[in-house]
Every structure is written in structure tokens, then in C-alpha cells.
């Protein structure tokens, strides 16, 4: 039995600083990914420093990061919003001086998949294929 089908970057996932979004038509096979090395974030001061937020914004611009990304650790993903101080403090207190991976956050509040009153919902669709004999 196969575990599933999907797109994988293989060994490139660990070795390249940036991997672009992979899509065909309207189907996204893989969101954009950024591998941030410890040397990339060495200029980020402590989260209590008065210049912290400004340095993070410079880092975001230099790396060409979108406003919202996901911090990826194993199969766990944490939403990071670079426009909110608490969010970026959480990111840099979590990763400390280790390398880390960020992934493009694909959902947008302007175009929610499901909306109820003032609530917006995002989701993930998993499709299963099987062969009839």
C-alpha cells in the first residue's frame, strides 16, 4: 500500500535557502519555503531590545518574506504575522540562534474559504485516490 502521492523537494529542501511555490494551473503542489540559517538571523537583537521590531522588518525585507508565514518544525506549523510585535517576538524567542524553516501562508482574509458572520475559517483539503479493479 502506498502512503500517498505528492510533491517533494527531496534533498533540495535542506540545502537551498529559498524554494519557490510549485503550482500547475490553480493547484498548488508546494508553498514557497525559506530555510533560515543561524547566520541569517544573527543581526536580530534580543526581543527586549528597542530596535528589535525594526531589525525584524529589515530581515523580512532582505529575505523577501510575505507578511504572514508559517514556522515549520516537523509536522507542526505556527502562524507568524510580521506586522505584529508579539508574533515576531514569539518566533525569535522560539528559534533562538538555531536555523529554522518558514513556509508561505496560503490563506487570505479577503478571500476566505468559509465565512460565518465575522468569523473566517481556513482549511486543508486532502484527497484520496484508489484504483477500482
Image (cartoon, rainbow, N blue to C red):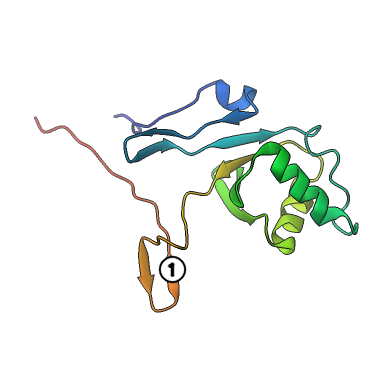
The image position of residue 79, as x and y in percent, is 59, 55
Q: Residue at x 33, y 46 (%)?
A: 126
Residue found at x 75% / y 50%: 57
Q: Residue at x 57, y 49 (%)?
A: 77
Residue drawn at the location 47% of the way across and 63% of the way down: 109
Q: Quadrant of the N terminus?
A: top left
- Identify residue for label 1: 120
Q: Quadrant of residue 18?
A: top right
Residue lying at the far bottom in this picture: please name it: 117
Q: Is residue 44 left or right of residue 74?
A: right
Horizontal side, residue 13 vs residue 131: left or right: right
Quarter of the figure with residue 28 = top left
Local packing at callout 1 (Cα closer than 10 Å; few below 14, some 14-19, many 20+) is some
Position in image of residue 49 (x %, y %): 91, 57
The front one of 78 and 86 is 86
Q: Does 28 appear above or below 114?
A: above
Split into 4 quadrants, where in the image is the C terminus?
top left
Q: Nearer the viewer, residue 61 or 77?
A: 61
Q: Secondary structure at mark 1?
A: strand
Amino acid at each position: 500500500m502506498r502512503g500517498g502521492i505528492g510533491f517533494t523537494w527531496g534533498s533540495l529542501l535542506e540545502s537551498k535557502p529559498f524554494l519557490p511555490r510549485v503550482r500547475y494551473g490553480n493547484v498548488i503542489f508546494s508553498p514557497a519555503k525559506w530555510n533560515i540559517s543561524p547566520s541569517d538571523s544573527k543581526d536580530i537583537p534580543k526581543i527586549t531590545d528597542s530596535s528589535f521590531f525594526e531589525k525584524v522588518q529589515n530581515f523580512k525585507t532582505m529575505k523577501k518574506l510575505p507578511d504572514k508565514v508559517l514556522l515549520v518544525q516537523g509536522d507542526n506549523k505556527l502562524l507568524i504575522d510580521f506586522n505584529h510585535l508579539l508574533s515576531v517576538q514569539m518566533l525569535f524567542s522560539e528559534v533562538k540562534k538555531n536555523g529554522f524553516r518558514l513556509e508561505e501562508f496560503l490563506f487570505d482574509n479577503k478571500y476566505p474559504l468559509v465565512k460565518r458572520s465575522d468569523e473566517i475559517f481556513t482549511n486543508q483539503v486532502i484527497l484520496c485516490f484508489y484504483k477500482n479493479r
